[in-house]
Amino acid sequence: MSAPRPALARLVLTLAAAPLLACGPKPATVAPAEVAAPVAAPAPVVIDAATIRDHVAFLADDAQQGRAPGSDADGRVQQYVVERMKAAMLQPGFAGTFVQKFEVNDGVRLRAGQETVLDVSGIPVAHAMVPFSADTAAPVVARLVYVGHGIVKEGKGTGDYAKLEKKVAGAIVVALVGGPDDPHLSPASTRAATKAIAARDHGAVGFILWDPAGASYPNHGEASDLGLPAVFVGKAGSAALVTALVGKAKGADPVAADLRRGHRSRKPGTLSTPVERVRLATANIAGRLPGSGKSDRVIVIGAHMDHLGFGTDSSLAPGEHAIHNGADDNASGVAAMLEICRRVAATPVAERPFDVVCLAFGAEEMGLLGSKHYVQTLPEAERKRIAAMLNFDMVGRLGPEGLVVAGAGTSKAWPALIEGHRGGLTVRTTDDGYGPSDHGSFYEAQIPVLHFFTGPHEDYHRPSDDLDKINVDGAATVATLAADLVDAMQRDTLVPDYVEVARPATPRGGGFRVSLGTIPDYGAKVDGVRLSGVRKDGAAEKAGMAKGDVITRMGEREIHNLDDYMAAFAEMKPDVAIPVTVMRDGKAVELTLVPQAPKAR
């Protein structure tokens, strides 16, 4: 963790009463009854741990079915947050309404009256849809070729495709999920979509993702159409798939079946995926607390509402179809945000020069889509009014290691302010303002941010993240600290300055083998990958890339979507230059990018 920057002097003057030394006449004695009693400042409303527990109990109840975007439960949660904001006397945050609707992609579904097909010589193979499949107008008929894990290490014809280019061309590729136990493999290379792209690059006409022991693959998320039909085969279809590949049943285990990379089925298979993209409606919820009018600036307090439903490809319990309640992630953050806003609303308006906007974001787990939508749809003048954004994501597991506050380097004002209000709480800070949560959407817009987080745990993104494991008193402590920071900003009319933070260090080994310093816009609907920004001193900045650029080519690969981008990312090497094309103001710009090695911590 990075150490706090030198404290910005924030002068606190304590006036001690002293005897009056005067040479004039002795003052007249005043009777006690004539002395006006000093008027004490009203004590701030206390953050209530019991109320936080009530919020989490509702949001993380099985009845909410994991709060997946676009679900009926998503609508119930939105209404709950609206009612709590109304009870705290917040005003609508969007032109007369609390609700800002937007749409997201979420996997694929069958076209009306259609069905998917996977069989070999009349032998059906049990399978399931995957979100990156193409829509087939007619079935694909071709032999199946097994390529192990289907990982490409150095480009076309390498890794698991070495010496298989002729066999794979025109075939239906079968690739295992995951990858071998190799610390040098980039996580990008083991993604299912990257494997499908590798198959497509080698001329395959179809793709089968295979997990011999798996139950299912999540058909969720903003996955792109990768241009070839694709399905998932798990435990239920493995025996039939092995039989199709080797010609006789030897069990569903590829090792037991003596299945080798490059093995081709004797007879052709048929693959058909008549699917269409699913569009779901979800929303951000916002309430506004108008200030006194002494300042036109705004403080944003936010947390995301959504979670993983019954499991998505982000679940760390893959194949387990179970409700992911997300008590810590992020019912705890929403509860803290609501309590902070209730406390701010109880502060006299005269003591609040800033407006405060309280925001519950939708579709954070799908790529910060709600917060990006909010920031991008704000008029520029409104974005510039935002003095700071405080984000709460997973604040329900406060333990001996204390609280992590990210973004402490995004303003020179933060270190002293945090230190002055942490009390006896152990607080560790990091400088970076990006991070995998909604504050990143605001920092990209050059807004100082703080992200409150009580640390990772073994229940993260698993069905076991439940209410009984939440430290509600700890969440109340975190919310109190944050509310004190808001009070201090209001009291001193403190507008934090914005500081651009250089890219953070990342661990060597076992992670990405290159660092580009690009910040993709996951919600952009463009042909390519739009950049929300580039990190200071990163490879992208040095190459001349800038916020708003749309990457259309990296090396030899055309980039049409984030999956293409990740596939290109997996093939790069540190310090080996590649040509990059970006669209800027409607014109193609040719640049040279030199990927950097990840910095060691």
Image: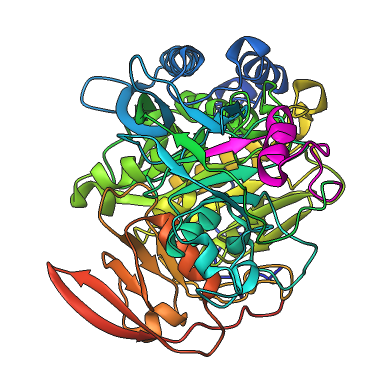
Rendered residue at 60%/31% (across/down): 336
Q: In this view, does 257 lie above or below 218?
A: below
Rendered residue at 58%/33% (across/down): 218
Residue placed most toward the observer, 212 or 9:
212
Evaluate whether residue 74 shows in this view.
yes
Q: Magenta part of the protein: which range?
A: 231-256
Picture quarter with the N terminus: bottom right
Q: Is residue 114 above or below residue 312?
A: above
Asked if residue 328 lies left or right of residue 409, the reply is right
Where does the image place residue 515, in percent across and percent down from the top left? 54, 75
Q: Which residue lies furthest to the top in this view?
A: 63
Residue placed most toward the observer, 301 or 223:
223
Q: Is residue 39 above or below residue 417?
A: above
Asked if residue 115 lies left or right of residue 290, the reply is right
The image quadrant of residue 373 is top left
Report if residue 22 lies within the magenta region. Answer: no
Residue placed most toward the observer, 29 or 73:
73
**Number of marks drawn:** 0
Rendered residue at 64%/36% (across/down): 233
The image quadrant of residue 45 is top right
Where does the image place residue 410, in percent across and percent down from the top left? 49, 65
Picture quarter with the C terminus: bottom right
Asked if residue 569 lies left or right of residue 245, the reply is left
Asked if residue 520 lies left or right of residue 23, the reply is left
Where does the image place residue 255, in percent across and percent down from the top left? 84, 51
The image quadrant of residue 67 is top right
Evaluate whether residue 433 shows in this view.
no
The type of colouring in the image is rainbow
Where does the image place residue 76, in percent across and percent down from the top left? 48, 11
Report if residue 252 lies within the magenta region. Answer: yes
